[in-house]
Amino acid sequence: MQLYLTPIATGYLTQLVLAALISGYFLLLLRQSRRAPHMAWLTGFFVALTGFIVTLFLEATLLPVMSLDN
């Protein structure tokens, strides 16, 4: 699996790092305060956002699949 870092991919990579750090921080806060339901929703949103950015990053860096009939 080879990754090709285009300018768009590096932009997604910086967004991925930022979203992962925010998600990790919110997971830490959620672990410390179990009684805050709004924190669970916020954490879930950022974890889902991180997953979405991972898919965008992989789409930008991986080669498209060659068709089988060629």
Image: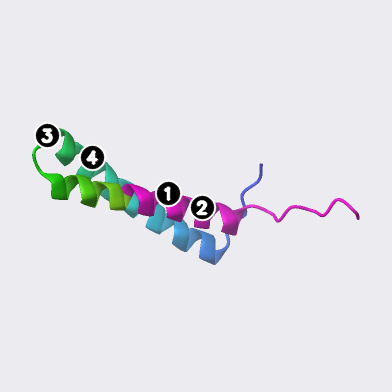
Gap in angstroms between the C-alphas marked 4 and 2: 21 Å
32 within the magenta span: no
As measured in the structure, the alpha-carbon distance from the residue carrying label 1 to the one carrying label 2 is: 7 Å
- Earlier in the chain: of badge 3 and badge 1, it is 3
The reply to whether dot 3 and dot 1 touch (C-beta < 8 Å) is: no
Q: Amino acid at mark 2?
A: Thr
The residues colored magenta run 47-70
- The residue under the point 62% across, 54% down is 4
Q: Which residue is mark 3?
A: 32
Estimate how packed mark 2 is, as few (under 14), some (14 to 19) or many (20 or more) residues with alpha carbons within 10 Å: some
What number is the disc on residue 27?
4
Q: Residue at x 10, y 44 (%)?
A: 36
The amino acid pointed to by label 1 is Gly
Amino acid bearing label 4? Leu
* Residue kind at label 3, given as amino acid type: Gln
Tag 1, which secondary structure?
helix
- Mark 2, residue position: 55
| Spot occupied by residue 43 in the image (x, y as percentages of width and height) | 24, 47
Which quadrant would the N terminus be assigned to in this image? Answer: top right
* Relative depth, front residue between 2 and 47: 47
Q: Mark 4 vs mark 2: which is more N-terminal?
A: 4
Q: Which image quadrant is residue 28 in?
A: top left
Residue drawn at point x = 69 percent, y = 54 percent:
63
Classify residue 67 as left or right of residue 13: right
Distance between mark 3 and mark 4 Cα atoms = 9 Å
